[in-house]
Amino acid sequence: MYTAQGKINRDALLEQHLPAVRRQALVLQVKLPSGVDLDDLIQAGTLGLLDALQRFDPNAGASFSTFASQRIRGAMIDELRTRDWLPRSVRRSARAVEQQLYRLEQRLGRPAGEREIAAEMGMELEEYRQLLNDTNNGHLLPYEELVAESGEPEAGADGPLSPFAALLDREQRERLVEAIEALPEREKLLMALYYQEELNLKEIGAVLGVTESRVCQLHSQAVKRLRAKLAAD
């Protein structure tokens, strides 16, 4: 959209893309703890859209819609990362699970079962499952967790990803896909239902024949397997 003088009509672009902010916020909210406020996500996304309007370079090759979508989502993720979801003690326990899980599965040569993981941790099964529940509230998407740890490729100030950053981004995603393929079948199905089909916890529980709480536990365990694998790689 351009003005009569051939310049980008920023007001028109803002009005056109504001509904996209709400759509992205709704998509993200269903994957997050219930305490996350939709308005907070929308506010962060709106700031991302305004930032996109300031930084967009029509000569860089990317469309404004693509560029704005990246900035909107990035702003929402940044907002979520500023929140301290979990006590430090729980975070330490989550890291310990990942480390023990990786060592156990390396020793077994296969995905470890819950009872095996609990025994490796020196915990009763129900104690381990409670830890899974506690730490599940701190997770976003597996990919977001991955890039938060290893460094997220970012768009430059004046345009989209650099060739190197784009390559790194693609390699990270390929590693993630490989790690998901190595999950136990039940956890792999859960991840597909959650992140690809975008079912909510209740719907996934109906498919798997388990409670919502159990879905949270399985999701938390699957993410820990992925993080352990990706960190080792």
Image (cartoon, helix red, strand yellow):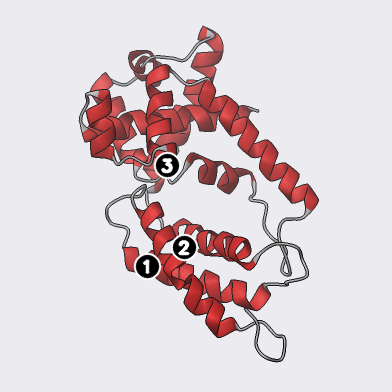
Read off the residue under disc 1: 40
* Residue type at the position of mark 3: Arg
Residue count near mark 3 (Cα–Cα under 10 Å), binned few <14, some 14–19, many ≥20:
some
How far apart, in angstroms, are the residues tagged by discs 3 and 2?
Answer: 19 Å
Give the side of residue 200 with respect to residue 21, left or right: left
Q: Earlier in the sequence, mark 2 or mark 1?
A: 1
Read off the residue under disc 3: 91
Q: Which mark is residue 201?
A: none
Q: Is residue 135 visible?
A: yes
Q: Earlier in the sequence, mark 3 or mark 2?
A: 2
- Numbered disc in front, either 3 or 2: 2
Residue 121 image position (x, y, % from top left): 39, 21
Residue 38 image position (x, y, % from top left): 33, 63
- Count of numbered badges drawn on the protein: 3
* Residue type at the position of mark 1: Asp
Read off the residue under disc 2: 79
How far apart, in angstroms, are the residues tagged by discs 1 and 3?
Answer: 24 Å
Image quarter (top left, top right, bottom left or bottom right) of the N terminus: bottom right
Residue appearing at x 51%, y 43% in the figure? 145
Residue appearing at x 53%, y 20% in the figure? 182
Q: Secondary structure at mark 1?
A: helix
Residue 200 image position (x, y, % from top left): 30, 41
The residue lying furthest to the top in this view is 108
Q: Earlier in the sequence, mark 1 or mark 3?
A: 1
| Residue situated in front as seen by the camera: 19 or 135 | 19
Q: Is residue 130 visible?
A: no
Q: Are marks 3 and 2 in contact (CB under 8 Å)?
A: no
Residue 230 image position (x, y, % from top left): 59, 31
* Residue type at the position of mark 2: Glu
